[in-house]
Image: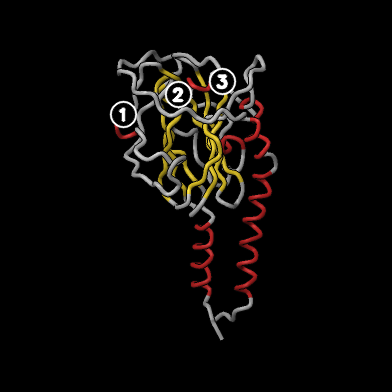
């Protein structure tokens, strides 16, 4: 008969908890990270960052670290200075629909991923100095998770070489890359950067962000419950073993 002592059981539980790990938004700089809050709007960080990350108007890149062996990812945008709900990522204040920054795609291994984005190409009138918020949605099988980043868009800003995307994950779902670190941020009242503009990147699919918001409704809660039930089942199985 298989026997497991309490110390070994604790180790197994910790390993199982690790398997429920989430994801991080490494660039642009996330508002913050709390694994327990990540199923909520903007990962539980509802206030805009005091300083916004400078970001290219037309040739940007997003970087995430997936802690799951497979996941579905997308990204959407708000032009509100202080978005408070998913509705703020659906349309502008005058009712103009906001296309998704990145349509749904899959990654098929744990690790660092990046992909290119062209915010100017969304066709909603973004210009030099626009203040926006990007929200990345991630589902690794335990419910929808979210991270937000507050940006100031600059028409003549070029990403430093360590933040340009060498392997676009929307085209290569197993193309993990090495992340060398994020750039600094600037005040939301900051001016233009003097760097020359970079070449145009791919234009994201013009699918309405409302599909992302609809997809997210209630899924975060149910996903978290599913993960919890999975852990309960795991512990219930162990309960059948004898302790020494």
Residue picked out by circle 1? 160
- CB under 8 Å between callouts 3 and 2? no
Where in the figure is residue 209, as x and y percent of width and height? Answer: 61, 30
> Is residue 54 in view?
no
Where in the figure is residue 196, as x and y percent of width and height? Answer: 30, 18
Q: Residue at x 45, y 29 (%)?
A: 117
Disc 3 from disc 2: Cα separation? 13 Å
Callout 3 secondary element: loop
In the picture provided, is 78 more to the left or to the right than 191? right
In the picture provided, is 116 more to the left or to the right than 223? left
Q: Nearer the viewer, mark 3 or mark 2?
A: 3
Q: Reply above or below: 210 against 38.
A: above
Q: Nearer the viewer, mark 2 or mark 1?
A: 1
10 Å crowding of disc 2: few (<14), some (14-19), many (20+): many
Callout 2 secondary element: strand
Disc 2 from disc 1: Cα separation? 17 Å
Disc 1 from disc 3: Cα separation? 25 Å
Q: Residue furthest bottom?
A: 1
- Looking at the picture, tell me which residue is in the foreground, 158 or 42: 158
- Looking at the picture, tell me which residue is in the foreground, 70 or 131: 70
- CB under 8 Å between callouts 2 and 1? no
Residue picked out by circle 2? 52
């Amino acid at each position: 008969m298989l026997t497991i002592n309490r110390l070994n059981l604790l180790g197994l539980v910790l390993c199982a908890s690790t398997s429920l790990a989430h994801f991080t938004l490494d660039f642009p700089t996330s508002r913050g990270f709390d694994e327990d809050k990540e199923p909520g709007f903007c990962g539980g960080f509802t206030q805009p960052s005091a300083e916004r990350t400078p970001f290219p108007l037309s040739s940007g890149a997003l970087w995430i670290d997936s802690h799951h062996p497979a996941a579905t990812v997308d990204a959407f945008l708000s032009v509100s200075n202080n978005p408070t709900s998913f509705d703020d990522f659906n349309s502008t204040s005058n009712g103009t629909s906001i296309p998704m920054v990145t349509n749904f795609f899959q990654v098929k291994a744990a690790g660092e991923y990046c992909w290119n984005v062209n915010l100017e190409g969304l066709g909603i009138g973004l210009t030099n100095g626009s203040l926006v918020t990007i929200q990345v949605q991630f589902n690794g099988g335990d419910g929808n998770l979210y991270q937000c980043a507050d940006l100031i868009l600059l028409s003549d800003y070029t990403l430093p070489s360590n933040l340009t995307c060498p392997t676009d994950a929307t085209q290569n779902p197993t193309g993990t890359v090495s992340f060398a670190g994020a750039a600094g941020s600037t005040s939301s009242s900051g001016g233009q950067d003097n760097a020359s503009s970079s070449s145009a990147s791919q234009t994201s699919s013009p699918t309405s962000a409302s599909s992302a918001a609809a997809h997210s409704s209630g899924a975060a809660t149910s996903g978290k419950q599913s993960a919890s039930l999975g852990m309960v089942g795991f512990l219930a199985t162990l309960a059948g073993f004898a302790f020494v």
